[in-house]
Image (cartoon, helix red, strand yellow):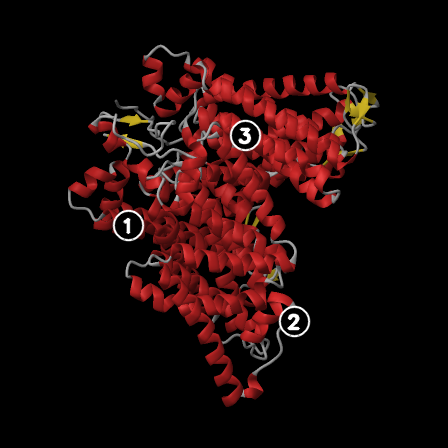
């Protein structure tokens, strides 16, 4: 079977004028046009049509103002985390997005960067190497490790590569956990290499140009500048010969090889560059946190990074950063009960208004849900008042108080919340995949009411669980609605 | 050296128990991979749900006052309930999270699967809290019961795990080799489009595959719960990883390969525990995996992939 993938993109100058292109291209771009539809699609398409330097410069300029606007360390820490995750996502994007290698060992390079810097600049071995030298050594080391892990990739493909690299990552975490009592060959000495579960602490901060970096703001600027530099570098690589070769490799390795591309070298290069970026981020991370632990580099981070890259769109630079931004900010917003509640109800209302097709239907739905709540409340207080109890987590003012007065709570609200949680998930699943708008409308009224009930009884009470629950749900929903991610280009397979 | 050799039979029994469970989990991975080329990362969590269903049935039928049914009936009921519920759960997951992504790039369903995994774990955490639950296996199978084979002792629970897993694998093998559905599954695995053109209802086959694979995971969850007695919301992660490793070791998409890979992984691990150190158990398992893949890049029984143009 002859299979050829066409990498299709919209013309960059004018998004929607398609008068100059031929019939086949028009047909090939059907998916791209479909992706540009809808409120989200339109905004993303317009962003993409703009000059990347102008948009990027503006965004980075705005971000650089952040430490001047707020001295809140918590906000700056999150901003720094966004940059750090952005860096990591960009590095992963090189391996997975550009070269198409399913590398599940990526966090190990981040760990090598972190532990490498920690060993070179702390009291662990009593070495305190100057920052530029330490970072350089660590980056080179990580790149070499990338080459080493890349070697099996020349023989393995797809999922076999995935499991070998995953094994590498697991071995790294296991070693960092157990090498606090490493025996030296040919002697009975025991050496503490990694500190085991206690990690390495009291790591030197970064010294740059004679300054010792301290405070969250300083690290934020370092991370932001590094992010900008790496973005610029990757953009240039992406538009060079190597970038085009990587894309060819990803689309069809066999064809690329037949065209005379040095497939082995290209794969190794992708691994090395991705690993170097991870190593760089790891060393900044270690200096920032002044400590590294094995659990900083475990598989949860890998999953989050993959989610960021794929959510943003594989192979897209702004996408990787946008994914990092979304997936590190949303969980933070869900942390505080008030913002979480605002985000939740706001999100439900916005989703209803945006997704229900004739706009009046969305408004009607919200009105119906509100009315349902009032009717249920009136009926319950009139007919069976003794079964009602107080709200499980009462709030005295604001949106929460309003919602809790609108809902009713049975005496055993926790149990009811748990049972209804399962019911609501089922209902919402049916609604979101249902075909008939009338049935959806009718089902949505009780679903949304019950969702609010479950939120007030269970979800708001367990914020840490809710965050991950929502993360999972967002991943599934976004993937099923936009399989190519936010900024990714849909590809058309021509068979 | 004497003690060293005396340990071998017992470690083999342990390895066989562990391996039988790994094989059951690996089968689900491999079957789904065979028909969809999808790594179902939520598989480990389906297994966790199975363990909880088994726990629920056991607590319902074994209150403080005594057993409400004979032990064999309770065990059978636990297995059947877990298999049914997990099978249905697998079908729902396929319908909601994977079917819309049939034609999407291969990594999209992978992320969707991770999302399902996060969701299931945290839903269980929300509803059932993070407490470990202890299965009262001793009510069903007293620890004294068991067989002595030479220096090794096979307790009744381990025997149940090994035989139960074996029976399920034999049944699965018969299903895949002898029935119409099995033939359809093999056809879809070889070439989905061609199978569809020859009149195979591809969607139905995929649903059936998810049902069977998830049911096996549910059974594995119950068996593990009985054997190791601890059930908690995060148990699916490690088990899923091990099942995946076993499936790849044997050659993913290959049913006998999954069984072989599972047994091999279990034996490797328990021998590593016995002879080297429990700390390096997982390390050695992964080193063995990497070595095997470097020598045979498509697993032990995996077919060599012929790239066609």
Q: Tell me the number on the disc at residue A56.
A: 3
Q: Earlier in the sequence, mark 3 or mark 2?
A: 3
Vertical comparison of B128 with A74: above or below: below
Residue A369 lies, in percent from the top left, at 44, 70
Left or right placement of residue A354 versus residue B128 in this view: left
Which numbered marker is on residue A313? none
Q: Residue B62: horizontal and vertical position, in percent?
A: 54, 72
Q: Is residue A475 above or below residue A364?
A: above
Q: Residues within 10 Å of mark 2 (few under 14, many from 20)?
A: few
Q: Chain of mark 3?
A: A
Tell me whether marks 1 and 2 sit on the same chain.
Answer: no
Q: Which residue is mark 2?
A: A394
Where residue A230 sits in the image (x, y, percent)?
A: 58, 23
**Helix, strand or loop under label 3:** helix
> Residue A27 appears at what percent x and percent y?
23, 33
Q: Which residue is at the front of the view, B88 or A434?
A: A434
Q: Chain of mark 2?
A: A
How far separated are the C-alphas under marks 3 and 1?
58 Å
Q: Residue at x 33, y 12 (%)?
A: A259
Crowding near the residue tagged with mark 3, few <14, some 14–19, many ≥20 C-alpha atoms within 10 Å:
some
Q: Quadrant of residue A293?
A: top right
Residue drawn at point x = 63 percent, y = 66 percent: A398
Q: Please give the name of the residue rendered at 43% of the width and 43% of the height, measured from the top-left corner.
A: B26
Is the residue marked by circle 1 packed among few (<14), some (14-19), or many (20+) residues within 10 Å? some
From mark 1 to mark 2, how far is it between C-alphas? 55 Å
Q: Nearer the viewer, mark 3 or mark 1?
A: 3
In the picture of the structure, the residue carrying the numbered disc 1 is B175
Q: Quadrant of the N terminus of chain A?
A: top left
Q: Nearer the viewer, residue B139 or A73?
A: A73
Of all chains, the one bearing label 1 is B
């Amino acid at each position: 079977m002859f299979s050829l993938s066409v990498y299709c993109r919209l013309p960059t100058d004018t998004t929607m004028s398609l008068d100059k292109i031929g019939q086949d291209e028009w047909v090939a771009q059907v998916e791209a046009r479909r992706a540009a539809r809808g409120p989200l699609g339109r905004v993303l398409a317009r962003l993409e049509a703009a000059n990347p330097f102008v948009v990027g410069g503006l965004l980075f300029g705005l971000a650089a103002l952040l430490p001047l606007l707020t001295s809140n360390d918590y906000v700056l820490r999150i901003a720094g985390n966004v940059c750090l995750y952005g860096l990591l996502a960009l590095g992963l994007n090189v391996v997975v997005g550009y070269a198409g290698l399913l590398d599940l060992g990526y966090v190990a390079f981040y760990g090598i960067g972190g532990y490498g810097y920690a060993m070179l600049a702390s009291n662990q071995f009593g070495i305190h190497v100057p920052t530029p030298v330490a970072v350089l050594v660590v980056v080179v080391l990580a790149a070499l490790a990338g080459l080493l892990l890349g070697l099996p990739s020349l023989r393995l493909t797809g999922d076999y590569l995935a499991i070998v690299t995953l094994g590498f990552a697991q071995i790294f975490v296991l070693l960092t956990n157990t090498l606090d009592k490493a025996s030296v060959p040919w002697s009975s000495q025991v050496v503490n290499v990694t500190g085991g579960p206690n990690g390495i602490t009291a790591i030197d901060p970064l010294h740059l140009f004679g300054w010792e970096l301290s405070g969250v703001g300083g690290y934020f600027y370092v991370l932001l500048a590094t992010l900008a530099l790496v973005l610029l570098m990757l953009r240039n690589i992406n538009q060079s010969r190597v970038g085009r070769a990587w894309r060819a490799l990803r689309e069809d390795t066999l064809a690329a090889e037949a065209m005379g591309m040095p497939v082995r070298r290209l794969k190794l290069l992708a691994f090395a560059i991705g690993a170097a970026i991870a190593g760089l981020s790891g060393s900044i991370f270690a200096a920032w946190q002044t400590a590294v632990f094995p659990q900083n580099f475990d598989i949860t981070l890998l999953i989050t990074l993959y989610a960021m890259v794929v959510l943003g769109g594989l192979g897209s630079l702004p996408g990787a950063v946008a994914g990092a931004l979304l997936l590190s900010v949303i969980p933070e917003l869900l942390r505080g009960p008030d913002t979480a509640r605002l985000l939740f109800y706001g999100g439900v209302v916005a989703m209803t208004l945006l997704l229900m097709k004739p706009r009046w239907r969305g408004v009607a739905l919200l009105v119906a849900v509100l009315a349902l709540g009032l009717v249920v409340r009136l009926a319950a207080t009139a007919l069976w008042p003794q079964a009602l109890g107080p709200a499980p987590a009462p709030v005295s003012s604001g949106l929460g108080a309003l919602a809790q007065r609108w809902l009713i709570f049975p005496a055993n609200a926790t149990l009811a919340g748990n049972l209804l949680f399962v019911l609501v998930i089922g209902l919402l699943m049916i609604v979101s995949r249902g075909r008939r708008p009338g049935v959806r409308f009718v089902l949505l009224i009780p679903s949304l009411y019950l969702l609010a009930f479950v939120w007030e009884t269970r979800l708001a009470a367990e914020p840490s669980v809710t965050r991950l629950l929502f993360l999972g749900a967002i991943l599934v929903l976004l993937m099923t609605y936009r399989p190519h991610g936010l900024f990714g280009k849909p590809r058309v397979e021509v068979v | 050296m004497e003690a060293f050799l005396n340990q071998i039979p017992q470690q083999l029994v342990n390895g066989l128990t562990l391996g039988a469970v790994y094989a059951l989990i690996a089968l689900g991975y491999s079957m789904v991979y065979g028909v969809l080329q999808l790594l179902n990362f939520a598989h480990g969590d389906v297994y966790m749900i199975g363990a909880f269903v088994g726990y629920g049935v056991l607590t319902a039928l074994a209150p403080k006052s005594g057993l409400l049914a004979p032990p064999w009936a309770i065990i059978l009921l636990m297995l059947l309930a877990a298999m049914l519920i997990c099978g249905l759960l697998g079908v729902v997951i396929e319908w909601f999270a994977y079917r819309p992504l049939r034609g999407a790039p291969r990594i999209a369903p992978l992320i969707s699967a991770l999302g399902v995994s996060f969701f299931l774990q945290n839903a269980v955490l929300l509803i059932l809290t993070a407490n470990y639950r202890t299965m009262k296996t001793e009510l069903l199978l007293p620890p004294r019961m068991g067989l002595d084979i030479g220096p090794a002792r096979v307790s009744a629970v381990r025997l149940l795990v090994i035989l139960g897993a074996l029976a399920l694998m034999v049944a699965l093998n018969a299903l895949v080799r002898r029935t119409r559905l099995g033939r359809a599954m093999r056809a879809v695995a070889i070439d989905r489009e061609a199978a569809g053109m020859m009149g195979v209802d591809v969607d139905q086959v995929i649903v059936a595959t998810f049902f069977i694979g998830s049911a096996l995971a549910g059974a594995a969850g119950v068996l593990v719960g009985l054997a190791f007695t601890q059930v908690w919301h995060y148990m699916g992660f490690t088990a899923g990883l091990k099942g995946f490793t076993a499936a790849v070791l044997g050659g993913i998409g290959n049913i006998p390969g999954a069984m072989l890979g599972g047994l091999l992984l279990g034996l490797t691990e328990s021998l590593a525990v016995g002879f080297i150190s429990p700390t390096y158990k997982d390390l050695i398992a992964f080193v063995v995996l990497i070595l095997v893949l470097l020598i045979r890049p498509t697993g032990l029984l995996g077919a060599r992939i012929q790239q066609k143009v």
